[in-house]
Amino acid sequence: MTTPTPQPEKTSVGNTGASLLRTYVMLGVGYFLTWLARRNNIVLDEQSSQALVLGISGLITAAYYTVVRLLESKSKVFGWFLGLATSPKYAPTDAPAQTPAAP
């Protein structure tokens, strides 16, 4: 007798869509923070700005994602800060293939 392979949870947009949406929302937050800084006249000279924007954008994006994921592990509601209240579920790739038992 075989045990059925558990299927990953499906979200309304699917796992691929969920992962993409959560990535794009995070990038949108980074863009919004950049826009907010420029609106408040936090602007540097061209050379310094290019290097700083690359470094800080990456750090802010990574920090935002890390904080939200840690909060999400405590309460799923924090997932909305990444676009969906649920994270995508993926099937394990290292699980052995199950064959049906002979009758």
Image (spheres, rainbow, N blue to C red):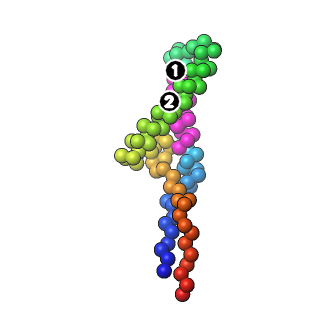
What residue is at 59 percent from the left and 17 percent from the top? 49
- Tell me, yes or no, whether the highlighted magenta stretch contains residue 26: yes
Secondary structure mostly taken by the magenta-highlighted segment of the chain: helix
- For disc 1, the neighbor class at 10 Å (few under 14, some 14 to 19, many from 20) is few
Return the disc, 2 or 1, that comes first in the chain's sequence. 1
Q: CA distance from mark 2 to mark 1?
A: 13 Å
Q: Is residue 99 visible?
A: yes
Residue 21, located in which quarter of the rendered image? top right
48 horizontally vs 11: left or right:
right
Residue 58: give its label: none
Rendering coords of residue 82 (x, y %):
49, 42
Q: What kind of element bears circle 1? A: helix
Q: Are the residues flagged by discs 2 and 1 in contact, CB closer than 8 Å?
A: no
Taking the magenta stretch, the answer to whether it contains residue 71 is: no
71 left or right of 101?
Answer: left
The kind of residue tagged 2 is Ile
**Residue closest to the far top:** 45
For residue 60, which numbered disc appears in the image?
2
Q: Residue at label 1? A: 37
**Residue 24: which quarter of the image?**
top right
- In magenta, the rendered stretch is 22-36
